[in-house]
């Protein structure tokens, strides 16, 4: 009926409704009778003839089971799941995840979210692998079990209402900084200054509420968190794609820093005025940063950054070597004889 341009609200009396047909009718109802058409590939139904539209009536964990199931199997939810599969492939291809590591979450309602499953490689995700959870971590829909680190993502979204998506993974260079307990220095590359605000969270066992709490405490003014001895988690107020971009940016930046440290030269940095220009751009984009309103002298404080290899021995410390008394006596005796002969 959709492909032939008929109004699907005028169903024949003997119509048999398949699960996908029920999903379509649910979308029509929740979108207030929005016109639906077949997509270009005839593989699904697209609201507004363009792309899947979210329900006009926001869902929550209190919505009925049938409403949640219908939403979870709708074309809109399917489009979110496909985004997660695509980002998962990118994470795996760039070696930002290993084994079954990493996880992603997209906010799907007032207190519900779609997340990746546990024990599945991010390089082989399928839409049917995804899970629907409430903000307590309870699984509402999905065949596979939700990620074991869901609480961290949910605590981020509870603490930061602007967050609509988050991405966690283990990129090697950025994780190296997290293991060393070093927040990357600032004032070196524009993209890092504009798109990221980085902080370091102390280590706690992954998946525990304590870990999520420590990360969530930082997301008010930071969108990229280094998790000590673990990895990186990012969030975005726009979409999952942007959260993933932040992973790429922090990883490339940390790699650039390590290359710079090997060149044996003090890095060139932005002037306070140049950084202020970048912060103005950042603020106009709606990104968080704790440096807004700071004095110029406070903007490029990289006191904790120690590039290159430093000597572990204090050059000013006095050292004493263990001496052989007999050898010292012999040296003194020979020295005295030589001096006597010279006289």
Image (cartoon, rainbow, N blue to C red):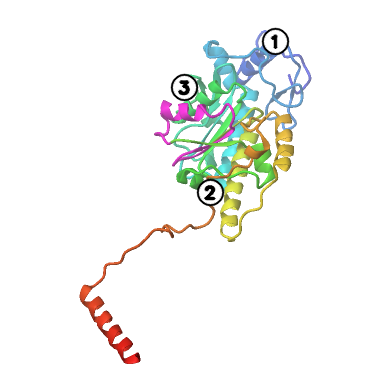
Spatial CA distance of label 3 from label 1 is 42 Å
Q: Quadrant of residue 267?
A: bottom right
Asked if disc 1 and disc 2 are in contact, CB closer than 8 Å, the reply is no
Q: Quadrant of the N terminus?
A: top right
- Identify residue for label 1: 12
- Residue 103 seen by the camera: yes
What stretch of residues is rendered in magenta?
203-232
Q: Earlier in the sequence, mark 3 or mark 1?
A: 1
- Residue 19 seen by the camera: no
Q: Nearer the viewer, mark 3 or mark 1?
A: 3
- Identify residue for label 3: 137
Picture coordinates of residue 134 (x, y %)? 50, 19
The residue at 57%/56% (across/down) is 261
The residue at 45%/20% (across/down) is 138
Picture disc at residue 173: 2
Q: Earlier in the sequence, mark 1 or mark 2?
A: 1
The residue at 53%/42% (across/down) is 183
- Secondary structure found at label 2: helix
Question: Does 5 appear above or below 227?
Answer: above
């Amino acid at each position: 009926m959709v492909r032939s341009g008929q109004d699907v609200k005028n169903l024949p009396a003997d119509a048999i409704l398949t699960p996908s047909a029920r999903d379509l009718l649910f979308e029509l109802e929740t979108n207030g009778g929005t016109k639906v058409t077949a997509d270009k590939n005839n593989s699904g139904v697209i609201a507004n003839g363009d792309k899947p539209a979210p329900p006009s009536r926001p869902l929550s964990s209190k919505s009925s089971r049938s409403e949640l199931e219908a939403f979870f199997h709708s074309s809109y939810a399917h489009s979110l799941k496909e985004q997660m599969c695509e980002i998962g492939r990118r994470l795996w291809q760039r070696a930002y995840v290993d084994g079954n590591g990493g996880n992603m979450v997209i906010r799907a309602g007032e207190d519900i979210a779609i997340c990746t499953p546990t024990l599945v490689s991010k390089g082989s995700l399928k839409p049917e692998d995804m899970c629907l959870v409430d903000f307590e971590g309870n699984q509402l829909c999905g065949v596979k079990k939700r990620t074991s680190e869901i609480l961290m993502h949910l605590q981020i979204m509870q603490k930061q209402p602007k967050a609509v998506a988050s991405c966690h993974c283990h990129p090697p260079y950025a994780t190296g900084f997290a293991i060393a307990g070093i927040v990357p220095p600032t004032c070196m590359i524009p993209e890092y200054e504009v798109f990221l605000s980085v902080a370091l969270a102390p280590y706690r066992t992954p998946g525990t509420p304590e870990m999520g709490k420590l990360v969530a405490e930082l997301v008010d003014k930071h969108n990229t968190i280094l998790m000590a001895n673990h990895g990186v988690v990012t969030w975005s107020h726009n979409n999952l794609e942007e959260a993933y971009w932040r992973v790429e940016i922090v990883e490339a930046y940390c790699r650039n820093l390590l290359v710079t440290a090997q060149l044996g030269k003090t890095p060139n940095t932005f002037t306070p005025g140049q950084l202020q220009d970048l912060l103005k751009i950042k603020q106009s984009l709606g990104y968080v940063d704790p440096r807004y309103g700071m004095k110029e002298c406070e903007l490029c404080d990289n006191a904790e950054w120690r590039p290159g290899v430093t000597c572990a021995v204090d050059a000013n410390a006095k050292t004493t070597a263990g001496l052989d008394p007999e050898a010292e006596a012999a040296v003194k005796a020979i020295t005295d004889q030589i001096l006597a002969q010279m006289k």
